């Protein structure tokens, strides 16, 4: 394998770079939108839970069940289940654009749960102290919850982005582009196991970079 690895990588290098760019676009765009949607959902799950500042059993129950339902759907099935919705939003179900919608649908509930777990770590005594000072629920959300829990929220986003890397690879099996498509098209279908190895290594490097960046930001926020 080693003797053929370099020639094969050189031969397919332009396709590898193209696939890498597609994966980075999918993960960055869907990750950003998922954060914009998932963080508020996670906050809503926390503040409407039992005993919290905006306790609402009905709202929490409905939202929690919706999040759990979406999280329980395997991603491959999710892609096949929402082509009409995907086409309605971006006009296509293939390529990078067609992959972004199901990636967001899969990531938002996952990120929401991660954010919920992160914010539940905020000391209830701190919240009660600010309540006693007359802080409104919105002030507590933005000045206490999201400030005190910002480090853990960063980790929640980091874990979600890493999950998106795996999801983005799966989109390659259904024409979504990216490194998954590259591995299937040039590795699996051409019986080039070395191409598969290179693709895995590239994905591992991306995961390590995202995790390292998330850990660095977490440490800085934890000591600030």
Image (tube, rainbow, N blue to C red):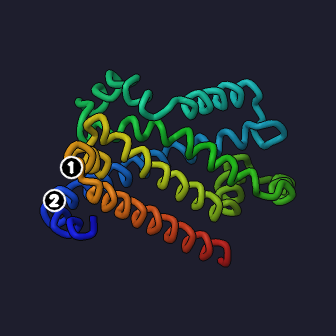
Q: Name the residue under label 1.
A: 186
Q: Residue 12 carries which label?
A: 2
Q: In this view, does 3 lie to the left or right of 198?
A: left
Disc 1 crowd, CA 10 A, few/some/many (<14, 14-19, 20+): some
Q: Is residue 204 left or right of residue 87?
A: right
Q: Which of 142 and 76 is in front in this view?
A: 76
Q: In which quarter of the image is the N terminus?
A: bottom left
Residue 149: x and y in percent read 68, 60
Q: Which element type, helix, strand or loop, lies under badge 1?
A: helix
Residue occupying image coordinates x 81% and y 36%: 50
Residue 203 position by quadrant: bottom left
Q: Which of 37 and 66 is in front in this view?
A: 66
Q: Residue 83 carries which label?
A: none
Residue 202: x and y in percent read 35, 63
Residue occupying image coordinates x 37% and y 46%: 168
Q: In this view, does 169 lie to the left or right of 148?
A: left
Residue occupying image coordinates x 73% and y 37%: 48
Q: Is disc 1 in contact with disc 2, using a CB cutoff of under 8 Å?
A: yes
Residue 31: x and y in percent read 43, 50
State how far apart marks 1 and 2 are (Cα).
Answer: 8 Å
């Amino acid at each position: 394998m080693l003797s053929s690895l370099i020639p094969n990588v050189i031969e397919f290098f332009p396709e590898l770079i193209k696939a890498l760019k597609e994966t980075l676009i999918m993960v960055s765009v869907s990750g950003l939108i998922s954060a914009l949607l998932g963080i508020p959902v996670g906050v809503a799950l926390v503040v409407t839970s039992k005993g919290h500042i905006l306790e609402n059993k009905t709202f929490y129950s409905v939202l929690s069940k919706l999040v759990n339902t979406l999280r329980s759907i395997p991603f491959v099935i999710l892609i096949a289940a929402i082509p009409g919705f995907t086409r309605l939003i971006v006009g296509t179900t293939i390529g990078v654009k067609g992959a972004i919608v199901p990636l967001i649908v899969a990531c938002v509930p996952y990120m929401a749960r991660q954010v919920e777990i992160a914010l539940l770590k905020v000391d209830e005594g701190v919240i009660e102290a600010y309540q006693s000072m007359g802080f409104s629920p919105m002030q507590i959300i933005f000045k206490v919850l999201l400030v005190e829990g910002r480090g853990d929220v960063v980790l929640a986003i980091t874990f979600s982005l890493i999950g998106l890397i795996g999801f983005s690879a799966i989109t390659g099996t259904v024409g979504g582009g990216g490194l998954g498509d590259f591995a299937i098209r040039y590795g699996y279908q051409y019986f080039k196991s070395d191409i598969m190895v290179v693709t895995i290594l590239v994905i591992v490097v991306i995961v390590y970079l995202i995790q390292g960046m998330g850990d660095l930001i977490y440490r800085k926020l934890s000591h600030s």
